[in-house]
Image: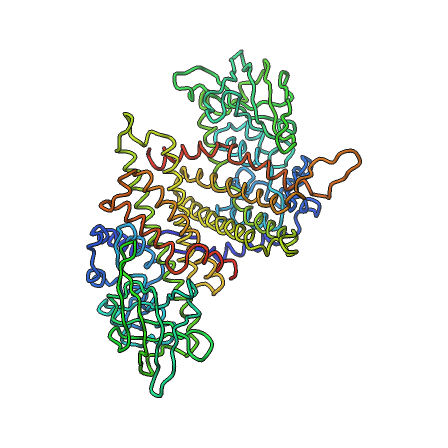
Amino acid sequence: MDFSLTTEQQMLSDSVARFARGGTEASWATMAALCWTAIAIPEASGGLGGSAVEVMIIMEGLGRGLVAQPFAESCVLCPTLLTELGEGHRPELQGMASGTLRAAFAGAEAETRFDPLNPRLRAGRRPDGWILDGVKSFVPDGAAADHFLVTARTGSEGPSVFRVPRDAPGLEREDFLCFDGHPASRLRFTGTALPADALLGAEGGAGPAIELALDRATAALCAEALGAMEALREATAEHLRTRQQFGQPLAGFQVLQHRLVDMFLACEEARSMTLLATLRLEAERRERIRAVSAAKARIAQLARSVAYQAIQLHGAMGMCEEFTVGRQAKRLIAIGMLYGDADHHRRRFACA
Amino acid sequence: MRLDFTPEELAFREEVREFAARAAPDAMRRKVRDGEELTKDEFVAWQRIMQARGWAAPSWPREHGGTGWTLSQRHIFEEEMAAADCPQQAHFGLSLIGPVLYTFGDEEQRRRHLPGILSGDVWWCQGYSERQAGSDLAALQTHAVRDGDDYVVNGHKIWVTYAHWADMIFALVRTSREEKRQRGISMLLIPMDAKGVTVRPIETIDRNHQINEILLDDVRVPVANRVGAEGAGWGYGKFLLARERGVGATQRRLRRAVERLRDRLRRAPGPDGRPLAEDALFADRLTQLEIEVIGLEVTVLRVLAELEAGHEPDARSSMLKIRSAELLQRITEMAVEAGGTEAMPFVPLDDATLPPGAAHAVRNYLYTRATTIFGGSAEIQRNVIARQILGL
């Protein structure tokens, strides 16, 4: 049992903290220059071959600083999908490692809710490749992506994954901002013709790779939530210490102290769950699923409660878009819904 | 980072598991499984079994007759004993006064009292709370006045668990009035058969007699029975409360409690003639509970790892106390809900009989309402965290 960081990991953590102080201005180029984009990619594919702990450290820092960059998607989820599908040799991975090429995962559909393994989007065979038809309703950071990794069903059982360039003919993209300020896109495929090698891995055989990639991304999001929760807890404590009402600091009121203690308890539990998810990503499938889904289910609840408390204890200031508190709270609520909400993951945990 | 035990620790787990599988007599094991209270004789018999194995005091250092185990070993030990439905060892001597004596007591006190704790021959109880001194423990009024080589003690103690079984009580008493109330408090070891000690039973809402009131009327206690320095009792009391709140056996027993609850749901009839375990609403609540227990388990491991790395214990033990108490309350609550009205019959009248074990669920449910009150209430724990960790 050891939860301490190595010297290198501590340096990474400090470096992320410095970077994240730049807030929303913190740029992708800097992350690439610091080689973070390469951290979760295996060495054989041009990455640094780091562990889930490094990903956790980065994500916690990004969450703390409310940095809106698609690290979990482009640097964790998509590379995992490619390597697990046996496409680790693809040049795209080198581009993703260096940060010059960005990918987005197109999995979610309005009809299938949080089930990533039974896409409705249809991939039909044509003589020299494939034709895609259907809609992907929610693609995080789709606008910035050079290509999409799209889940689809073919004639065979089980999902398949296709690589689709952003300028593919018959692909329409609509971009929007979500309530947490993060960009996302809707993709409409209408007879989108793709070459044969657009299929990644075996036809119908992408299920395990999708599951693992999403589990890694989900664990990363747990760490982001943890960072944001800690930041909100600290900001709220500071507010209670400085804000004077009825002739004394708010921190003098026991009823408010106990609220803050409950935020602390939530943060500590979230840290335990994040560690569990992170350190069980390499375990066998059932154990991994139970760890990740337990973590995501619980963190979705805890994150929301911390978000609500932070707004409440900041009073009207918590409602202002101008202040970080409200935006941080919105990101936490959004994370709770990404890649499966609390109900979805409780069900997945129970059925695993 | 590593969320796994070492190969040596896993080998130790096997050793404990092997012992745990056959250590407890079947009747005792069944009682633990059904959540039934052990008798004093059973507690003593269990302590003898543990002593015969050389594991009388899992948390004590070797030089005082303990196992000298690391925190991880103790953790593994507790987990395996819980998994095999072995009883917990009575904790007033082993977990509370024993460590105070080998840490702060004199040689004579150790020689006299530690062997009886290890063998289970001497039963201890804890005299802290008074009617006007509950959460505000420093308000305690029981006083000890020096008279030659004795103290003369007058006052009362309340909520004293198993006082009616006890041979000895360790009590916090006021030996002087100081401006800072905490300064005038000393810890005395008082034989329960001393003249002037009266024990009165208190019946609790689970219709059980476990706690008592103790009246102390001109009780003469030799000065040699004072632990450490006069006026230093508050510090020992805090040392002891930290142990009571800290990483303890309860947290390791939650997982087994959830498993037992799941078994119960498989047998309990639910809607549409199917077991309650297959009712989506009920099953989901159990899943929620299970996930929260996992969260607490990882938190325990984190605290453990920090203590093993040499960090001082801090107010995070309060966090463990808050969470384990809440979870235990919810587990016992669900066990009663699983029974529905079948869980309600409690006291048979006339010639009636209850199915064996029928009342245990309710009794445990009612009893565990106390877990957020004893050993420092949930509110006091929050005060401690607010002050010591959050700096409010």
Instruction: Count every numbered label the image shows and give the total.
Output: 0
- For the C terminus of chain B, the image quarter is top left
A333 horizontally vs B53: left or right? left
Which residue occupies 26% across, 68% down? A145
Q: Is residue A79 above or below residue B87?
A: below
**Residue A343, image x and y in percent?**
46, 55
Q: Quadrant of residue A306?
A: top left
**Residue B235, image x and y in percent?**
44, 27
- For the N terminus of chain B, the image quarter is bottom left
Colouring rule applied to residues: rainbow
Of residues B30 and A263, the one nearer the viewer is A263
What residue occupies the far right of the structure in this picture? Answer: B351
Of residues B175 and A219, the one nearer the viewer is A219
B89 horizontally vs A156: left or right? right
A323 horizontally vs A137: left or right? left
Which residue occupies 29% across, 49% down? A328
**Residue A128, image x and y in percent?**
33, 87
Q: Is residue A71 above or below residue A256?
A: below
Q: Quadrant of residue B181?
A: top left
What residue occupies the far top of the structure in this picture? Answer: B147
Which residue occupies 59% across, 48% down? B81
**Residue A224, image x and y in percent?**
33, 54
Of residues A187 and B58, the one nearer the viewer is A187
